């Protein structure tokens, strides 16, 4: 099966994860794709393909020569940011210029807004109809891994032992929660979960979440002087005390941020939800401490117990775990060059399953899959870049 055909099959499954769910996987529909993948794995010769009770899919490919046991990992869920239901992909022979995704809804992907279109002229782009995301993050990774394995098995040449793993719930930060690192049995691994062709990532944000809860005192506004404490107003005070220049819309590269991504409330109670990110561990800790200092200040102003902050670390920068085993990165760079790519190491302004897995003893850099504009309705992926990524994965598996 060609990589494009396999990819279009997988994006027909709605696999959005749900951060408000406590189950694993967070949505049962991810298991529907998992079951389909298991059948496809068996069909191409991965005899031990299986899905466990938590929705993780595993399989192994015996090597024909001795060498390191290499893992290839991708995730099955799509982001909650944009609908992943009833995706209507189409392949466009792109000649340049603005691209109309949905004429009726007047949805146009403009080169001015999405400059990556410029370097993809002359390619065949898989796009959405402008009403959903595409799901290349990360069904492109799944399709590329399985296509690479299928071609390796068909070619019958030398290859090292491989371990295959597909995870649920990566988009909500839980993809590595129940991954069986010991049972997986790889010496090192790669997540096929990146974007632009040639990108190779082994630096990512340190990440945490912050939940700020605020308690107020409700009094009739006509007699509220010196009595009312409006929890929503205190919430605004809290947010405005965070540095405005450290918001995502004002940062890039290695610059960290704190982002408000949810809020609700009334006079008596309010809740703010943040994500905190920084590549530098010391600056990361400073950002978290800032939340506590602001809470202490507001409690001194409005009364003890008015503001409470709950901080939870999500993952850390994998760089410190990759630097001692840079041969893993060098192997990927060599595979990229062999597949006609120019490897570029870039910091991830986010995270992958590989970050957590690296800290659990499985060094795991992230590889490009070719996609662009993830998590939104302007997501697309060139067919030619997917095919190039398949070649890259095959070279990684060769001794």
Image: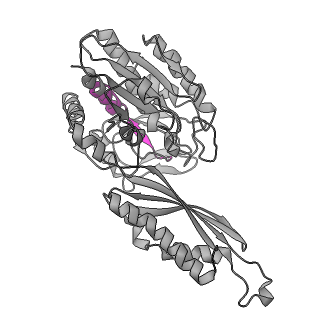
Q: Viewer-proximal residue, 200 or 309?
A: 309
Q: Position of residue 312 (x, y in %)?
A: 51, 55
**Which residue is painted at 31% across and 15% down in the image?**
152
Q: Is residue 384 magenta?
A: yes
Question: Percent position (x, y) of residue 136?
Answer: 45, 36
Using the rendered image of the protein, determine whether residue 26 is visible from the camera's viewpoint: yes
For residue 96, side relative to residue 259 (left or right): left
The residue under the point 61% across, 77% down is 234
Q: Is residue 248 visible?
A: no
> Coloured how?
one colour
Tell me if residue 122 comes above or below residue 9 in the rendering.
Answer: below
Residue 182 is left or right of residue 198, and the answer is: right
Question: Closest to the observer: 358 or 372?
Answer: 358
- Residue 135: image x %, image y %? 49, 37
> Who is closer to the viewer here, 308 or 231?
308
Q: Tell me the quarter of the image containing the C terminus.
A: top left
Residue 133 % position (x, y): 52, 42
Task: For the N terminus, give its image quadrant.
Answer: top left
- At a point 37% along the width and 41% down the height, the residue shown is 359
Q: Residue 316 in magenta?
A: no
Q: Specify start and end residues of the magenta stretch as a single range.
A: 376-392
Quadrant position of residue 277:
bottom left
> Residue at the spot x=57%, y=21% of the render?
35
């Amino acid at each position: 099966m060609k990589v494009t055909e396999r990819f279009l099959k997988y994006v027909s499954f709605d696999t959005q994860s749900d951060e408000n769910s406590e189950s694993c996987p967070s949505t049962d529909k991810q298991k529907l794709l998992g079951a389909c993948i298991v059948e496809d794995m068996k069909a191409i010769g991965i005899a031990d393909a299986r899905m466990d009770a938590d929705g993780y899919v595993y399989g192994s490919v015996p090597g024909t020569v001795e060498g390191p046991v290499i893992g290839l990992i991708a995730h099955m869920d799509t982001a909650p940011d944009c609908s992943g239901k009833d995706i209507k992909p189409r392949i466009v022979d792109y000649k340049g210029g603005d691209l109309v995704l949905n004429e009726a809804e007047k949805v146009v992907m403009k080169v001015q807004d999405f400059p990556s279109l410029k370097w993809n002229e002359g390619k065949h782009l898989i796009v959405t109809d402008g009403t959903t995301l595409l799901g290349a993050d990360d069904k492109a990774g799944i399709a590329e891994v399985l296509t690479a394995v299928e071609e390796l098995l068909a070619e019958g040449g030398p290859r090292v032992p491989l371990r295959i793993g597909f995870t649920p719930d990566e988009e909500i930060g839980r993809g590595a929660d129940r991954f069986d690192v010991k049972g997986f049995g790889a010496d090192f691994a790669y997540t096929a979960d990146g974007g632009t062709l040639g990108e190779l990532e082994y630096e990512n944000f340190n990440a945490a979440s912050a939940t700020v809860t605020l308690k107020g005192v409700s009094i009739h506004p006509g007699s509220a002087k010196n009595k009312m404490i409006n929890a929503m107003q205190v919430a605004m005070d809290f947010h405005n005390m965070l540095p405005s220049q450290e918001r995502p819309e004002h940062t890039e590269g290695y610059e960290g941020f704190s982002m408000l991504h949810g809020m609700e409330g009334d006079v008596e109670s309010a809740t703010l939800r943040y994500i905190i990110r920084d590549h530098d561990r010391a600056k990361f800790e400073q950002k978290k401490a800032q939340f506590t200092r602001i809470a202490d200040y507001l409690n001194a102003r409005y009364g003890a117990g008015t503001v409470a902050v709950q901080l939870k670390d999500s993952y850390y920068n994998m760089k410190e775990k990759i630097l001692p085993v840079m041969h893993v990165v060098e192997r990927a760079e060599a595979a990229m060059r062999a597949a006609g790519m120019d490897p570029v190491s870039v910091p991830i302004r986010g995270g992958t399953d590989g970050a957590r897995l690296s800290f659990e003893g499985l060094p795991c850099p992230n590889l490009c899959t070719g996609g662009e504009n993830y998590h939104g309705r302007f997501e697309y992926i060139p067919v030619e870049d997917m095919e190039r990524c398949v070649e890259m994965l095959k070279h990684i598996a060769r001794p």
